[in-house]
Amino acid sequence: MFFTDDSSFCMFFIVVNQAFEAEILTEYVIRGNAGILKCSIPSFVADYVLVDAWINDEGAIVENDGKYLVLPSGELHIRDVGPEDGYKSYQCRTKHRLTGETRLSATKGRLVITEPVGAMKPKISEDSLIKRHASETTGLALLCPAQAYPVPFFR
């Protein structure tokens, strides 16, 4: 902090550019339900790094369409998963807000599709119930990440 001639002061913040690796964990999904892949960014850089894009195993950027949705939080939402989705893998591309540096996740995430055995009541993972704050720039996505068989209806 320093003071200027007009008695006001200015503050400077120094951010150390630390090396980090983003990772994606394997997600287990019941066929027909939705899967959500999360790009895990270490907490010491999480305030400065955001998910810029998702890249499929063919090297193409995943676009929002009826099957895929990249959420404002950076997670990849995949609708109506089937056996073919278990053969695909995805990497997240992160961007450092201060340096502009982009990098791919160290690991590739994938879905493990399980076949239902009989009826299964809706289940919501506690890990998926994260409170999020909305802003004018990021928007807001409200999800109900329940899995069941038969596939649950949402309203």
Image (cartoon, rainbow, N blue to C red):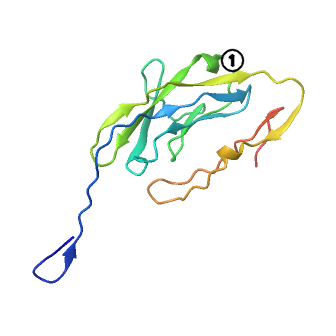
Judge by depth and name the residue closer to the eye, 124 or 11.
Answer: 11
List x then y, in percent, for residue 96: 34, 43
Residues 96 and 145: in front is 96
At x 21% / y 70%, what residue is drawn?
Answer: 1
From the top left corner, tell me how far across and down residue 110 is, in percent: 58, 24
Q: Residue furthest left?
A: 5
Left of 49 or right of it: where is 149? right
Q: Residue at x 47, y 53 (%)?
A: 138
Rendering coords of residue 127 (x, y %): 66, 44
Residue 116 placement: quadrant: top right
Residue name at image x 34 percent, y 37 percent: 19
Determine which residue is flagged by label 1: 83
Q: Position of residue 65 (x, y in %)?
A: 55, 33
Q: Quadrant of residue 10?
A: bottom left
Local packing at callout 1 (Cα closer than 10 Å; few below 14, some 14-19, many 20+) is: some
Q: Residue at x 76, y 49 (%)?
A: 155
Q: Amino acid at mark 1?
A: Pro
Q: Nearer the viewer, residue 127 or 142?
A: 127
Is 62 left or right of 155, judged from the image as shown?
left
Depth check, front residue: 154 or 1:
1
Q: Is residue 122 above or below residue 27?
A: below
Image-based side of 18 in relation to 6, left or right: right
Is residue 80 depicted above or below 98 in this figure? above
